[in-house]
Amino acid sequence: MQEAWSKETFQKLQTKLSAEADRVKSSIPFIPMQGHYRDLMMPGGLHWWCNGFWPGMLWQMYSATGEEKYRRFAEEVDARLAPLLEEPEKMDHDVGFLFILSSLAEYKATGNETAKERAVRAADILAGRFNEKGDYIEAWNPGTIPGTDTTGMMIADCMMNLSLLYNVSEITGDAHYAEIATRHADTALRVLARQDGSAAHIGRMDPETGEFKEYPAGQGYDPESSWSRGQSWILYGFTNAYLHTGRKEYLEAAKRTANYCIAAVAAFDWLPVVDFRAPQDGRYDSTAGMAIASGLLELAGAVEGAGDLGQYDKDVYERAALKILMACDEKFDRWDPETDGIVSGGSLRYHDDRMAGASIIYGDYYLTEAVLKLNGKYLSVW
Ligand code: GLY
């Protein structure tokens, strides 16, 4: 039944994304309004942190199907994003999400040297945010989030951005990128990952002394709670860090968070609520479910060869990923090829229900990854 679901969903994905690509082309989508995407709908314009997810989907589909239109549109979006590299002072830690899924994916899919150079330039920008005293990558520039003092903030999401540094190290042979990633991951392990497998969203460091100061509010209910998408970034991010470094403490952190997420999501009929430790009001975050599912599938591959009875853990992680994907498919997925967006039921953050229930581009991206992983057609980008 699960195998049949994986195959059938890959067929539906091809039909849906083929039609969507014909409409969206090299526009840069985020959330459909009245069933359709608009180009660059967020006020940040080209700088919006989510602008890599559409080219990421196109590169995944190009790699899985060989269809030229995906490549053409993806190359056009990548060229649109390239001018961001000329304004490093306007970038934040999410330069990783932006360029892993565009230029780095392009280089991996095609070997294009210009795309490689862009990925290296993006890695330089990310590495330039590293605070040597505190061993962390600074999340935001001062004044970029109105009303919030972002000084010294390091965040769970950045665990995903580290893959830019690890990959560029492997591509160029320059170890300093990977060293920065590993020093940041060690700090995230100490500051953000909790012993019970849950994780804080944001930690504040003192940029002068490098000491940990406090847990500011993030996108979850409160600093002690457990924002589901933040858990997915920790699960998937430490899995990636383990795969790049072989460090067992990262694998253990990924497994702790995976086990925590599986228990938490199973308690809600395999549907991810916005925050696992918060008053529940019936809101979900399907995007967290998709990122947790794809992260679990990545972890399943990682534990298989890691000893310690990993072959049994592999089955557990794969089964749990499928439970989440199938439960979310039944409740949230919209396969009508005439409209844009697949996975409804998304959320931007706990204390903000403006987009509650929306189909958000990163939910669709991680669904795409997960379905391609299940079908042996995934382009490894992280
Ligand atoms: N801050 C990135 C996210 O919303 O997951």
Image (cartoon, grey):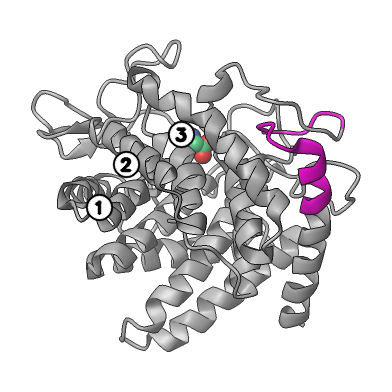
Q: Nearer the viewer, residue 73 or 372?
A: 73
Callout count:
3
Where does residue 242 sit, x and y in percent of width and height?
30, 65
Q: Residue at x 58, y 62 (%)?
A: 293
Where does residue 102 sit, x and y in percent of width and height?
51, 43
Residue 42's quadrant in the figure?
top right
- Ranked by sequence position, the earlier of labels 1 and 3 is 1
Q: Quadrant of the C terminus?
A: bottom left
For residue 128, above or below residue 101: above
Q: Amino acid at mark 3?
A: Asp
Per the model, the C-alpha gap separating discs 1 and 2 is 8 Å
In this figure, which residue is indicated by the disc labeled 2? 120
Q: Nearer the viewer, residue 132 or 320?
A: 132
Per the model, the C-alpha gap separating discs 2 and 3 is 36 Å
> Are there few (<14), some (14-19), or many (20+) residues within 10 Å of tag 1?
few
Which mark is on residue 222?
Answer: 3
Q: Is residue 52 left or right of residue 120?
A: right
- Ranked by sequence position, the earlier of labels 1 and 2 is 2
What span is in magenta? 17-34
In this figure, which residue is indicated by the disc labeled 1? 172
Element assignment for label 3: loop
Circle 1/circle 2 CB separation < 8 Å: yes
Which mark is on residue 310?
Answer: none
Q: Is residue 274 visible?
A: no
Q: Amino acid at mark 2?
A: Val
> Are there few (<14), some (14-19), or many (20+) residues within 10 Å of tag 2?
many
> Are there few (<14), some (14-19), or many (20+) residues within 10 Å of tag 3?
some
